[in-house]
Image: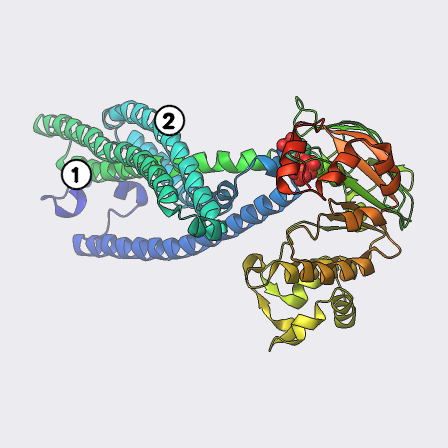
Amino acid sequence: MDDVLKRPAVLEGDSLLARLGLTTLDRPTLLAACLAALVAFTLLNAAAAYWGSRFLGGVGERVTAAIRAEVFTHLQRLSLSFHDRQRLGDLLTRTTTDVDYVQGLLVSVLSVLVPNALVLGFITTICFVVDPAFAFIALAVAPLLFATVVFYRRRIKAASRAARSMDSDIASTVSETFSSVRVMQSYNTESRHEAGFRHRNLARMDAGLRVVRLQSALSPLVDVIIAGGTVLVLWVGAQRVLAGTMSLGLMLVFLAYLKALYDPMKALAKLTTIISRGQASAERLSEILDTAPLVVDRPSARPAPALTGAVELRGVGFGYSPDSTVLSGIDLYAAPGEMVAITGPTGAGKSSIISLIPRLYDVTQGAVLLDGVDVRDLQLATVRSQVSLVLQDAVLFGGTIFDNIAYGADGATRQQVIAAARAAHVDEFVRALPLGYDTPVAERGVSLSGGQRQRIAIARALVRDTPIVILDEPTSGLDAISEQYVMRGLDRLMAGRTVFVIAHRLATLRRADRIYVVDHGRIVESGRHADLIRAGGLYSRLDYLQHVTPNEARSSLRVLPTGREASA
Ligand SMILES: Nc1ncnc2c1ncn2[C@@H]1O[C@H](COP(=O)(O)OP(=O)(O)OP(=O)(O)O)[C@@H](O)[C@H]1O
């Protein structure tokens, strides 16, 4: 300004141009050089901005994909005891939107915070070099700005966390409602679900509004504080120009620097919302990543050999939480190839017992032994690959019928899958479908009947060809004809394997090599059907319930030692 525009030119000895050795240039050349430099810097800046944004955006996407994969993988590894306490919607929001917010945080840290912090440092240095006193005045607002940002950051983070947890609540409500849409519609309870949803939705809106209020207050507040700084600089600058202690050019340049100084400050202060929200989400993700799986391989665990199928529970105690006892003193044995039935009143602990065999949970006392070796001394994956589970309600996944049968057996050939399907009586109904085994199954298998789903589940277990098979009331929800088919499939599945079956049906119990009767988390009787009937204990009373009318059954419930409804 001073060197080009001021008349007469004042090319002072210590001016920037003098230091650069440019004092010999005439004014038009100097002007042209300055403008050329301006254009060159703008182009350089544009190129840097383009590559910077491409690079940082790419880094953001890659890091986010890595975080999402890490969270998903970790969630899969977490033990059932963790998942028992979780709501699906919460896990959904954490793996999707929370990861997105962390991406927002990362990208803004890289693309806004880092460059602006650098610019800020650079301009501050220049200001101090040009005029230290003036620089101090310009930075006078910085502490106030800092205090404001700190004040709001804490509040926005807390509010964002609350909003995120309500997002989880909403997602859980949606997933629970629509996974039970049949029950809801048939019980005509839509309005109840709607009211619950509306309540949560409003709570989420309130939490969101709180974030908006804080965010809305912060931005203008930052502008006002910064305007205060500008006023201060103008005031002092004008006084100094009038007093002749500062050139007008220097003051104008200082005002330009001031903009360059305040713009990054503004950008950083306004980043508070994105950073606070991202931090809240990052904390939610680290809660998952910091949770260690409870059921893990011991360092000394060795791969399980091919098991013969001898299973023993020796003095087993178990609870789902440290302060609960669900099973105690369980002693149970199955020789290779034996069929062992577990029966007893509802809530007695039958499902808990069988879940200990593939080590879905760890015992709290005693041990589960496979072929005489503590299951905790064997590598988890090698144990689970030798145990197949067929549950009461078959779970199917999105994919074709073929995929669903081959689900647990990596590398199963088409012939193996079809052979298993034949044995499990899946082939009969699959052949009638236009696409056969390539028929897509809707999510959770809703397009198939209960019996068909169960037969697919049996075929899935057959393909795995494991020495140990666990059946949790596999025919309980089926009609007589479906049950016949499923039973025939089960016969194939059980042949030559060690089978644990939770059963209440006489037909199954009669066939068992041994029946364990569980009550209140203890084994109260064991033996063959005929022996147990003869013994006249709980089993005989449970069995009796299967032959009486509902009224008689109801009155007999009162004489059950458990005092609870018998699952029969
Ligand atoms: N995941 C879990 N977390 C906490 N407690 C559980 C869990 N699963 C079962 N329980 C509790 O453990 C006890 C035994 O349950 P379990 O499911 O083993 O009984 P069950 O005999 O299989 O019952 P049912 O015949 O009704 O299926 C019950 O009191 C039950 O409330």
Q: Residue at x 65, y 60 (%)?
A: 451
Q: How far apart are marks 1 and 2 (CA)?
A: 38 Å
Q: In this view, does 556 lie above or below 115?
A: above
Residue 252 in the image: state x and y as whole percent: 16, 38
Horizontal side, residue 125 vs residue 548: left or right: left
Q: Which residue is drawn at 37% across and 39% down?
A: 196
Residue indicated by mark 2: 154
Q: Which residue is drawn at 60% across and 39% down?
A: 83
Q: In what quadrant does ligand 1 lie?
A: top right
Between residues 484 and 194, which one lies in front from this camera angle?
A: 484
Q: Residue 296: in sight, yes or no? A: no
The dot on residue 243 is none
Residue 519 in the image: state x and y as whole percent: 74, 30
Amino acid type, residue under disc 2 in the picture? Arg
Mark 1 or 2, closer to the camera: 2
Q: In which quarter of the image is the C terminus?
A: top right
Residue indicated by mark 1: 252
Indicate the quadrant where residue 447 lies: bottom right
Secondary structure found at label 1: helix
